[in-house]
Every structure is written in C-alpha cells, then in structure tokens.
Image: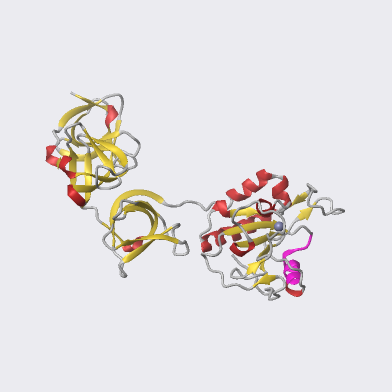
Amino acid sequence: MQINRSILCTNTCNMQPAGRTAKDIRYIVVHYVGALGDAKANCQYYASSSVGASAHYYVGFAGDIWQSVSDQNIAWHCGTYGTYYHPDCRNANSIGVEMCVRKKNASTLYASDTDWYFEKETIEAAAGLIRELMEQYGIETDHILRHYDVTHKICPAPFVHNPKAWEDFKTLLKTEDRSAKVNYVAAVESPDGILMLRTGPGTSYPSVGSAKTGTVVNVRREYPNGWRYCRYYDGGGKLWEGYMGGAYLKPCPDYPHMIVKSPDGILNMRKYPHPTGEFIIGLRNGYNVGVLQDAQNGWKLLLCGDSFGYADGAYLTEVGGYQSWTGKITGGNLRIRTEPVNGDIRYVLADGTLLEITGEIMGSDGYIWYQVKKDGNAIGCCRSDFVRKI
Ligand SMILES: [Zn+2]
C-alpha cells in the first residue's frame, strides 16, 4: 500500500512527539474530515497551521493515502474536555485515520446532516490501510473504533447515522484466515532456549508467554507464513494457547499409544497431573490415547482426539491389551479416513463389509472412532455409529 509522507506535520502545536512502539498503540480511531477537502489539502493545512488538532492519516477521494503525523507520535484526534464513553482508548494509545467525505447537499455542513457519504475508493483504501496497521501493531478488530465510540461526537457521520455501514466496513477488516486445521505434536527447539507465545501469527504481535526448549506442544493450526497456533502446559498446570514460530517447533510423530483400562470404565483427563487437577473429559475404556510425556507420580500427558491433558498412567495398558473384534458396516457406505474427523478419505466401503476393530479413539466431533483393519491390514479409522458387532 502506497502512503505519501511528503507533507508530514512537524508542528508541535498539532501533535505531541512521542517514542511510541507496538505495545503503546492499541486502537485505531476512524474519523471523517467533516468538510469537503481532499486528503492532500488536509495534510498541507495541518503541516502549516497551528490548529491544536490532527490525525495520523488522511484517505482521499481516489483512495490516495497521506500521512500527516508519524505513528510513533501522538495526534490529537479523539481527545475531549467532556466525557469519555470508552474506558481505555485515548489519543496516547491510538492512531487516528481521517476519511475524506462527500455531501449531496453542500449548502450546509452540519454533522447532524444525514447526506454525507464516502466514495467507494475511500472506503476500500481506508480498510486496506487499517488492515495493514492491525497487522503491524497486532490490533484486533474489536479495537477499531469510531470517534463516536470514544466521545459520542458525530464522527464519522456516515458511520454514525448508518451503523450498518460501520458494521459492513468492519467486515472489510477481517483478514482472510488461510490457516489449515491440524492436530499433531511437536517439541520446542529454540536456539536461545525459549520460544515466545504471541497473540497473533507474527513477531509484530505482543508476546504473552514463553515455552522452554523441550516443551511438548499440541499444534492446532498452520499458517502460510510458517506460524502455528499451539497449546501447551507449563509446569504449574496452566494451559497456554497462542501463536509460535513454526521454525522452532520440531514435529514428533513417534510417541507411543496406549489403551485406557480403568476399573470403573472411565479415566479422567485433567489439566494438572493430580486427582485435584481441573477435569477435562472422561476417557472410556478401550480408547486409544497418545502418550506424549511422563509427568509426576506416574501421570502422563496424553492426546486423545482433540483432548489434551493429564491422566493417571496406572490405568493405561499396552495397545495389545485391546481385545479386537469383528464388526459389520451397517446403514450405508462408510468412509475410512487416515485419522478421525478431518483425515483424508482413503476408502469408501460398502454396506455389509466386515472389519476388524483394533482400537477406539474419541474424535473432536464427539463421536467414537474405530481404528480398523481389513483383510489383516490397518486401513485407517471410521466413525463407530455405522459399525455393528457381529
Ligand atoms: Zn473525529
């Protein structure tokens, strides 16, 4: 996106020099200029006159973008001597974006007039600019505000008179999620011993925690830029979720599997390796669980379908402990997938086909999935509700 910075305002009567960084910039406030001038003319005005007001960006009628105040400095666009209606957003922690505006009847220029409107080019360019700023500073959509939301000033008039237009504008800010859903296990392997956990997929997003090298991580989503959405436990039993750089996550697919075998038929999975840990889910006898790591007192960190947590290893038995049995596909053709729920479809087997059931696993869809063999070969897994025991 091209941003013209040739008329930057250095006039400290219109802005406050500050050394703001990403952590200081938490909001973007959208305005309309409230007059009929174009973006360049606005920039020239604020660079040459002491008016005690300013904004960081002006978006013109043709979609041209002019920067007036550098992001690191504080512009005066949403302050008031009156009442603030937003608890947190102020000039000091926001970026102001002014949109140039048209009016059907230009004989009056009152904010209360309802015939103000934006050119399509202005709307699209403003959305593009704001998307870039969101990415750069790690700002989420709920921190994109109208000036109205901060002080109740009728600004930007087209988005205050028509709240639906504001909602439509905000849908333009949602960046397309091109991540892929995955579910595998990796270990942190970082040259400096720790890997930061961030609020978004990139180093521009604030860090909220860090994991030591060796931490076992359940990877949930993969992003095209190499980032991963992950979850892991720290030693204190807190479950952390967020984004990590995939370059420092080493996939470890070769963990052992065991079978749940509990005297009362259910093994409780918890968030901490102790009977007082917060309950996650009951694992039924016969479930096939991935054993990722040993924890204290014989407990183990497990992955079972979508469920990730600790259980007492005393109630797990070797995979051979599952008494395999013969089932018959009943009620229609049945898809055999590489893994439960979202795995690739490997075969479609006809109603009446006989299968050997060699294990069970809880899918993220809430169904039990069977691990199956056909003619002695492991072929994948299938949903359990289309298989009858014979
Ligand atoms: Zn405003």
- Name the spot of residue 345 as percent of width and height, x first: 31, 40
Q: Quadrant of residue 260?
A: top left
- Name the spot of residue 355 as percent of width and height, x first: 19, 31
Name the residue at 24% across, 55% down. Answer: 252
For ligand 1, the image quadrant comes to bottom right
Q: Nearer the viewer, residue 309 or 244?
A: 309
Question: How many numbered discs?
Answer: 0
* Residue 234 appears anywhere in the view: yes
Q: Which residues are magenta?
A: 36-46
* Residue 316 appears anywhere in the view: no
Q: Nearer the viewer, residue 36 or 331?
A: 36
- Name the spot of residue 192 as percent of width and height, x first: 32, 70
Direction from residue 169 to residue 368 in the image, left or right:
left
Direction from residue 82 to residue 218 in the image, left or right:
left
Name the residue at 61% across, 67% down. Answer: 2
Q: Quadrant of residue 14?
A: bottom right
Q: Main secondary structure of the magenta part?
A: helix
